[in-house]
Amino acid sequence: MALLQIQEPGIKPHHREQKFAVGIDLGTTNSLVAAKVGSVVETLPSKDGDHLLQSIVHYGDGAVTVGREARDFLVEDNKNTIGSVKRLLGKSQAEIRGFGYHLPYELDSQFPDGDPAIVTRHGSVRPTQVSAEILSVLKERAEEFSGQEVDGAVITVPAYFNDAQRQQTKDAAELAGLRVLRLLNEPTAAAVAYGLDAGAEGNVIVFDLGGGTFDVSLLSLRNGVFQVLATGGDTNLGGDDIDRLLMEWIRKRTGFSRDIDEKALVSLNLLSNSIKHRLSLEENAEYAFNNFTGVITRHDLKVLCKIPLKKMVAVCSKVLRDANVKISDVKEVVMVGGSTRMPAVRETVADFFEMPPLVSYDPDKVVAIGAGIQAEVLVGNRTSDEGLLLDVTPLSLGLETMGELVEKIIPRNTTIPVTRAQDFTTYRDGQTALSIHIVQGERELVSDCRSLGRFELRGIPPMVAGLAKVRVSFQVDADGLLSVSAEEVSTGVKAEIAVKPSYGLQASAVEEMLKSSRENAVKDMESRSLNEARVDAERLMEVVDAALLEDPDLIDSRELSVIQSKRELLTELLRVGSSAEIKKVTEDLNLASTNFANRRMDAQISKTLHGESIDSVVSE
Ligand code: ADP
Ligand code: MG
């Protein structure tokens, strides 16, 4: 936490120099920049008066263009025009290829390190570089508007963004020459814009429906600080889906066949989008397409959107359920994202939460404005009692799992206070205690991270390995104090410990740990995958050995010899094999023993049905 400065007695404070800080909402569809203008924080317009910058980048013959000009190339030069790059941040090539929808541009499969990069006529560009183009335009916009250089920026990210996605957002900002004061969660920014941080304590829902994504966050405000209690959403639900539904509706009515050509498809898309926007203002909209004119009403659109609206409601109830919060305990609902302008969406939200949502701020601008307010605080133009000061965890916090691997529970840069829980289980049959080792750092192996403390959870009733459910909760309070508790869910046995994670770590040490994590990322991935393969192999061998000892009569000699040869090969590979080889043979051994395992299971079930309790079967 930053310390407040105190003036020496008798000396008059000299006028504090005002720094220029901005808040940036780097969106999937649109991006904005906000800063203090006069006495309020507002979004800044381009020279053409647009506040929204479309998050589209075109790599042209000469220059790189961003925004509406870039959008014009979506049709004629789609290979060099990149939209929705935010979806690629922090993702691997394999993850991107697995997205399940067609990307209009090409990925460079030969790119060094297998990092994702997009092939353009300017060469291959990384997602961070594309994002930096967008950020540069916003930085320039702010500097032209104010005549001042930007001293620092708060950049917003979705609450669910992981460490890699946050890191790449930061890298993109640095590439654009911005000093990142802090990454701020988008829902928190929206709540700050509405001044909810200064209001009464309670729970706030932030409902964010953008172009391609839907996010719901449940925040809890305590002592002027927001905590994210739960998040939910759908990374493939947004205004684009509504456009598609409307396109299909119009296509059918105008008698176009399904295999309509690309050009007509694009104009149909633009038409649907503009009709949707019109229906947010008016009850009816007329349209003309393929020599056909028709009318669609607001009600038609609501009926058309039945399925997406149902999905939204399902996500909202899940978020409440996850955090165990009742609708009556929600104090405010904040609307974010262009698609919340749709009356159908507002009505659905109002019905579900039994209150009108907050819509007085422009839903496109509210995140950027909140980020701008936070930037003012962080750059030192306001003291913290004029606005809340959120702090973040400087390094990830996690615990050791089998194979000396680190499982991160709270990622670096998470706003505190925060509570996160994850379920773990036992490794061996009949295991009655769990050793919990808490570590801090970004590396994949325990030995490369900093050990913060250990404790034990005892008194777990003996069960089959993998059956016990131990919920480990990490809680960091507003002062950076970490406490960790572990509870076996079915029995309620519990243990906990308090540690101080970030204290005693100098900024330089944090920097050093981050640097080494970046340098070692590839190596770490390899050793992680090798260790995981080893743990899986060893576990399977133990299970097979125990089973062979217990039920030798349930296996035939041919099966036994296959199992034994695979087991020997695996023992050898554990010493010298690569992770791929180990995984392959583990799989083979698993297959070879499947029939045997099934017979044992049948035998055990009939044993249990004949009056022996599970306990006596399990604890032998
Ligand atoms: P993102 O956060 O994904 O960048 P935005 O919050 O900017 O997205 O929302 C973009 C979406 O909002 C688009 O699908 C757009 O069609 C929709 N939208 C914007 N204005 C309106 C409106 N008046 N009525 C209905 N939808 C709108
Ligand atoms: Mg958004």
Image (tube, rainbow, N blue to C red):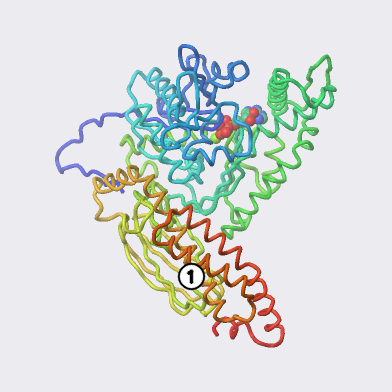
* Residue positioned most to the bottom: 611
Residue 500 sits above or below residue 430 on the image: above
Residue 502 sits above or below residue 433 on the image: above
Number of residues whose C-alpha sits closer than 10 Å to that of mark 1, classed few (under 14), some (14–19) or many (20 or more): some
- Is 362 in front, or is 611? 611
Q: Amino acid at mark 1?
A: Tyr
| Residue at x 71%, y 83% (from the top left corner) | 609
Residue 292 appearing in the image: yes
- Is 345 in front, or is 239? 239
* Position of the C terminus by quadrant: bottom right
Identify residue for label 1: 427
Q: Position of residue 30 (x, y in %)?
A: 54, 28
Q: Position of residue 235 (x, y in %)?
A: 60, 41
| Residue at x 50%, y 32% (from the top left corner) | 109
The image quarter in which residue 445 lies? bottom left
Secondary-structure class at tag 1: loop
* Residue positioned most to the top: 62
The image quarter in which residue 478 lies? bottom left
Residue 362 appearing in the image: no
| Residue at x 32%, y 55% (from the top left corner) | 449
